[in-house]
Image (spheres, rainbow, N blue to C red):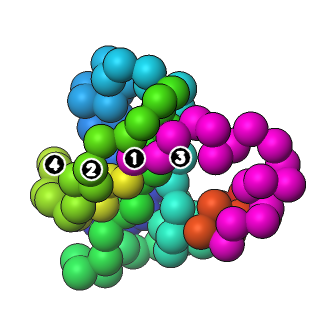
Amino acid sequence: MNAGDARTRASRWIERHAADLPGFTGAYFAGSICALSDEAPLPPSSDVDVMVVLDGDPPAKVGKFSHDDVLLEITFLTRSLFDTPEGVLGKYHLAASFA
């Protein structure tokens, strides 16, 4: 499978499962999937990191699971982490996805 297909399948999971969560404000990809072109092969052992942003306290991390033949790792984050650009850029685990 290539990275573009993996992103599409992960986006479907977001639409079907995350978008209806109370306080859902958005989602984005993080990690190595961001550096891959759509045509680049995704190694079978690689996961797709999905950050789901919610207004309010996030639930516990779901962790890794298979969805539509893609290994997803879902992390929930509170929207308040994104209130200011300085707040995002000051946190390495957030900044890398927005640099």
51 or 77, nearer to the observer = 77
Q: In this rendering, is residue 51 above or below 22?
A: below
Spatial separation of the CA atoms under disc 4 and disc 1: 20 Å
Please tell me whether mark 3 or mark 1 is closer to you in this view.
Answer: 1
Spatial separation of the CA atoms under disc 4 and disc 2: 23 Å
The region drawn magenta spans 76-92
Residue 85 on the magenta segment: yes
Residue plotted at (36% across, 73% down): 42
Residue plotted at (84% across, 48% down): 85
Please tell me whether mark 3 or mark 2 is closer to you in this view.
Answer: 2
Disc 3 target residue: 28
- Tell me the SS state at disc 1: strand
Amino acid under disc 2:
Ala
Residue plotted at (31% across, 76% down): 46
Spatial separation of the CA atoms under disc 4 and disc 3: 18 Å
Disc 2 target residue: 60
21 or 90, nearer to the observer = 90
Q: Residue furthest right?
A: 86
Query: In which quadrant of the rendered image does the N terminus lie?
Result: bottom left
